[in-house]
Image (tube, rainbow, N blue to C red):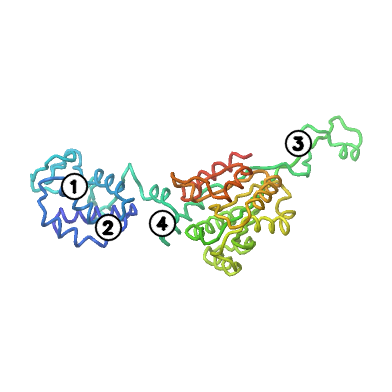
């Protein structure tokens, strides 16, 4: 293999690491095309690689940045292909060919490991910005690993219990028990972590996001004991116990087995009414933060939804609506369900990628 072909293969590995689909499978065609084109112009070389290595329009900016960072000479090195700014010719020069920005050196242990560091883009940053609905199974697993590193803490609340020896309020009970003393004992209210309640829409319109959002709920359950999770479409199902399983796939399998209306229609008002009747006294008694995850497509009566949203808003410390469609710049909450619910929502946020979950984690940490 020639030095130029070797660098083309290396460039394909870089694109694959950045999440560009189709880069590895087209490599034989790319090598054949590179040998047949006139590489005397940079533009011909650029567009040949671009056409053969990029399948999706969303990957074009990634390719452009990777090409600019990869195909340039190392400082002080003579290269066979002298890459100049776009639109200018580049010449065939000395017999030394080295187009890779970071070189693989040699030492006592043999060839050094190849490393590619692109300051402008990284595979992890690309994954953070990618929409959940477009992720593969491997990317979803990697996304879950990233979400598990976030700190989920919806603040603290004052409990009804008292802590002796703290605060400024006199502890009269202890004073009467110990009798005379030169120092009046004090007490203060204890602080406890605020509960978290998740209500997740699993109707047909949410099917593209349900897989990752349930993985998100499993991440919460793994690091947060005061958590209740419910899913709904036409009915309400509690899956808190299933999500406490340590292994993700087993937890999701048990949760899926418990749900009978997966992918059905959406009746958010009916689901919230059932939640209030069966569960509100048990899970809303300590001022929780409620995360309601839905795209707002509702087949029920908007007046019923507004009434149940008002009741939910009065019962919790903060009501946060997470809508995956909000990640699109063109989205407007014009559906009947969203218009009925928004007056009772404290925060209306997107939940379509890892970056939006990171912003949610940051918001929760500020609620204290």
Q: CA distance from mark 2 to mark 1?
A: 19 Å
- Earlier in the chain: of badge 2 and badge 1, it is 2
Between label 3 and label 2, give the one nearer the viewer: 2
Viewer-nearest residue: 97 or 147: 147
Between label 4 and label 2, give the one nearer the viewer: 4
Q: Residue at x 72, y 48 (%)?
A: 286
User: Which mark identifies residue 166?
Assistant: 3
Q: Residue at x 38, y 49 (%)?
A: 126
Task: Find disc 4 in the rendering and name its residue.
Answer: 134
- Earlier in the chain: of badge 4 and badge 2, it is 2
Question: Residue 156: x and y, percent?
Answer: 66, 42
Task: Find disc 2 in the rendering and name its residue.
Answer: 23
Q: CA distance from mark 3 to mark 2?
A: 63 Å
Viewer-nearest residue: 8 or 87: 87
- Earlier in the chain: of badge 3 and badge 2, it is 2
Q: CA distance from mark 1 to mark 4?
A: 33 Å
Question: Residue 368: x and y, percent?
Answer: 64, 39
């Amino acid at each position: 293999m020639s030095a130029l072909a070797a660098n083309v293969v290396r460039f394909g590995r870089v694109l694959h690491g950045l999440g560009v689909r189709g880069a590895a499978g087209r490599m034989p065609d790319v090598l054949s095309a590179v040998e047949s084109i006139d590489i005397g112009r940079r533009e011909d070389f650029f567009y040949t690689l671009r056409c053969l290595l990029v399948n999706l329009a969303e990957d074009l900016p990634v390719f452009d940045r990777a090409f600019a960072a990869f195909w340039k000479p190392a400082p002080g090195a003579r290269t066979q292909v002298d890459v100049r700014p776009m639109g200018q010719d580049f010449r065939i020069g000395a017999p030394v060919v080295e187009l890779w920005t970071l070189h693989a050196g040699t030492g006592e242990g043999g060839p050094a490991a190849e490393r590619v560091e692109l300051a402008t883009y990284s595979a992890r940053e690309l994954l953070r910005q990618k929409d959940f609905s477009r992720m593969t199974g491997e990317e979803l697993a990697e996304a879950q690993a990233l979400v598990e590193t976030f700190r989920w803490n919806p603040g603290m609340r004052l409990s009804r219990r008292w802590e002796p020896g703290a605060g400024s309020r006199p502890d009269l009970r202890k004073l009467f028990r110990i009798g005379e003393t030169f120092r009046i004992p004090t007490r203060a209210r204890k602080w406890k972590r605020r509960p978290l309640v998740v209500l997740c829409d699993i109707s047909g319109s949410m099917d593209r996001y349900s897989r990752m959002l349930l993985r998100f709920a499993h991440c919460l359950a793994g690091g947060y004991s005061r958590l209740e999770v419910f899913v709904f479409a036409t009915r309400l199902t509690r899956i808190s116990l299933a999500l406490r399983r340590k292994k993700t796939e087993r937890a999701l399998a048990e949760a899926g087995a418990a749900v009978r209306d997966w992918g059905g229609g959406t009746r958010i008002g009916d689901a919230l009414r059932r939640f209030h009747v069966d569960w509100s006294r048990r899970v809303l008694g300590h001022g929780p933060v409620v995360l309601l995850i839905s795209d707002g497509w509702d087949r029920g009566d908007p007046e019923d939804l507004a009434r149940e949203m008002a009741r939910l808003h009065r019962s919790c410390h903060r009501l946060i609506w997470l809508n995956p469609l909000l990640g699109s710049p063109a989205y407007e909450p014009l559906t009947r369900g969203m218009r009925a619910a928004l007056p009772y929502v404290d925060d209306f946020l997107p939940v379509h990628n890892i970056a939006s979950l990171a912003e949610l984690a940051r918001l929760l940490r500020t609620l204290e």
